[in-house]
Image (cartoon, helix red, strand yellow):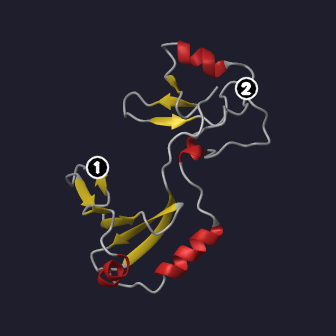
């Protein structure tokens, strides 16, 4: 299963997407903001993004999703790595950068469905803090696990749409 479009394939020109959106029997919707077609999962909820037309195999329209965030260059990632590589504890983290801009006591979670022999189980993820003032293009995310180990990641900053599909 492809998780990105194959740019060697020409765009869809059979107009299946446009027809599918108008047909109530086909669970396809168009997200105008992102310029994307989605297959709606009616029973389980959620949706899947189309990269190619299921009828002709042509490429779906280009998504605008990538234009909503800044791009973090390799140089900026390297600079941030150099800035954070020697920080080993939460104390050092907060002493170096001060209080985070966002602090999530529970940084995520996972639900394991129950079975005949065991009930469902919810596992909560580690604390996550975010610093937004260390870079012009990246937010610095830090996961702090229950043993106070740190894991740094650098993510592009949300800037909203640059252009409307047209």
Tell me: residue 126, above or below residue 158: below
Label annotation for residue 74:
none
- Secondary element at tag 1: loop
Q: Residue at x 65, y 19 (%)?
A: 16
The residue identified by callout 1 is 113
* Label 1: few (<14), some (14–19) or many (≥20) C-alpha neighbours in 10 Å: few
- Say if mark 1 contacts mark 2, CB within 8 Å: no
Q: Quadrant of the N terminus?
A: top right
Locate residue 114 relative to residue 54 in the image: left or right: left
Q: Nearer the viewer, residue 147 or 143?
A: 143
Locate residue 23 relative to residue 98 in the image: left or right: right
Between the C-alphas of marks 1 and 2, the distance is 38 Å
Q: Nearer the viewer, residue 14 or 130?
A: 130
The residue identified by callout 2 is 56
Task: From the top left corner, tell me how far across and down residue 158 is, in percent.
Answer: 48, 50
Task: From the top left corner, tell me how far across and down residue 80 is, in percent.
Answer: 53, 74
Q: Residue at x 62, y 22 (%)?
A: 17
* Label 2: few (<14), some (14–19) or many (≥20) C-alpha neighbours in 10 Å: few
Considering only order in the chain, which callout, 2 or 1, is on the residue closer to the N terminus?
2
- Secondary element at tag 2: loop
Q: On the image, which quarter does residue 118 sit in?
A: bottom left
């Amino acid at each position: 299963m492809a998780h990105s479009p194959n740019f060697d394939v020409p765009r869809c020109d059979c107009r299946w997407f446009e027809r599918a959106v108008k047909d109530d029997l086909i669970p396809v919707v168009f997200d105008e903001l992102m310029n994307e077609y989605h297959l709606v999962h009616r029973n389980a909820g959620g949706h899947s993004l189309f990269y190619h037309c299921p009828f002709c195999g042509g490429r779906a329209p280009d998504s605008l999703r990538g234009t909503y965030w800044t791009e973090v260059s390799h140089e900026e990632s390297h600079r941030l790595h150099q800035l954070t590589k020697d920080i080993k504890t939460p104390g050092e983290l907060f002493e170096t950068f001060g209080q985070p801009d966002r602090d999530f006591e529970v940084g995520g979670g996972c639900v394991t469905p129950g079975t005949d022999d065991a009930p469902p189980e919810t596992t909560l993820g580690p604390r996550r803090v975010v610093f937004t003032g260390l870079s012009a293009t990246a937010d610095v995310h830090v996961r702090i696990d229950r043993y106070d180990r740190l894991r740094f990641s650098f993510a592009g900053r949300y800037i909203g749409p640059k252009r409307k599909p047209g």
